[in-house]
Image (spheres, rainbow, N blue to C red):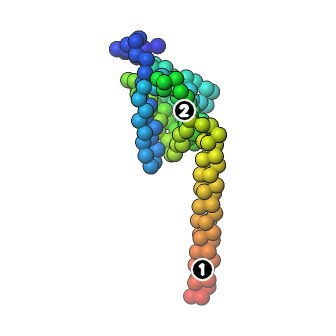
Amino acid sequence: MLHAGGDAAMKHFTLELCDARTSERIDEVESFVGEDASGSFGILAGREHFVTVLVWGICRYRTNDGRWHDVALPGGVLSFFEGTLTIYTHHFLQSDDVAELEKRLDAEIAAEEFARRAISDLIHRMDRELLRQMIRLD
C-alpha cells in the first residue's frame, strides 16, 4: 500500500535508529524485518503510516547494495512515516555479522550485570552503615 501522495517507483527509505546515547541514519534502505507482539513483519518503501512496539530481539534491514544488516535491541517503538522508519529504543547494537553481534550482546549484558551487582553491594554497605550510625546515635 502507498501512503497518500506516495510514488510507486519509490524503492528506498531512510532508517533512523535512536537510543539514549546516540542516533544513526541509514539511507537507501530497501526493506526492514522486525517483530512485535503479533509476530514478524516486513516494511517496504511506500508503506502507509505504521506504528508498533517492537519486542526484544534482532531486527534486520537490507540496503540498496543487497546486504543485510542486523540490529539488536531490547524492544522499542517503531514509526514509519513519509519514507522514514524511526526506531526509538533504550539501546541498540548494529552489525553485519550475527555471531559478532551475539558476542557484543553477551559482553554488554555481562558488563551491565557487573555494574548492577556493584551498585547493589554499595547500597547494602550504605544501609549497614546508616543502621550503625542510627544505633550509635540512639
Relative to 92, residue 85 above or below: above
Residue 49 showing in the rendered view: no
Q: Is residue 97 left or right of residue 6?
A: right
Relative to 101, residue 66 above or below: above
In this view of the protein, which residue sits in the foreground, 107 or 117? Answer: 107
Q: Could you tell me residue 130's position as x and y percent?
A: 58, 78
SS class of the residue under badge 2?
strand
- Residue occupying the far front of the picture: 65
Image quadrant in which you'd find residue 85: top left
Label 1 Cα neighbours within 10 Å, binned few <14 / some 14-19 / many ≥20: few
In this view of the protein, which residue sits in the foreground, 44 or 75? Answer: 44
Q: Could you tell me residue 106's position as x and y percent?
A: 64, 49
Q: Residue flagged by tag 2: what amino acid is it?
A: His
Q: Residue at x 59, y 30 (%)?
A: 35
Residue 123 showing in the rendered view: yes
Image quadrant in which you'd find residue 5: top left
Q: Residue flagged by tag 1: what amino acid is it?
A: Glu
Q: Residue at x 43, y 39 (%)?
A: 24
Q: Which label was assigned to residue 69?
A: 2
Label 2 – label 1 distance at C-alpha: 50 Å
Tell me, yes or no, whether the two marked residues, 2 and 1, touch with CB atoms within 8 Å: no
Q: Could you tell me residue 34's position as x and y percent?
A: 57, 29
Disc 1 designates what residue? 129
SS class of the residue under badge 1?
helix
| Pointer 2 or 1: first along the chain | 2
Relative to 20, residue 45 above or below: above
User: What number of labels is visible?
Assistant: 2
Q: Residue at x 42, y 25 (%)?
A: 28
Label 2 Cα neighbours within 10 Å, binned few <14 / some 14-19 / many ≥20: some
Q: Could you tell me residue 49's position as x and y percent?
A: 43, 23
In this view of the protein, which residue sits in the foreground, 67 or 45? Answer: 67
Q: Residue at x 55, y 38 (%)?
A: 95
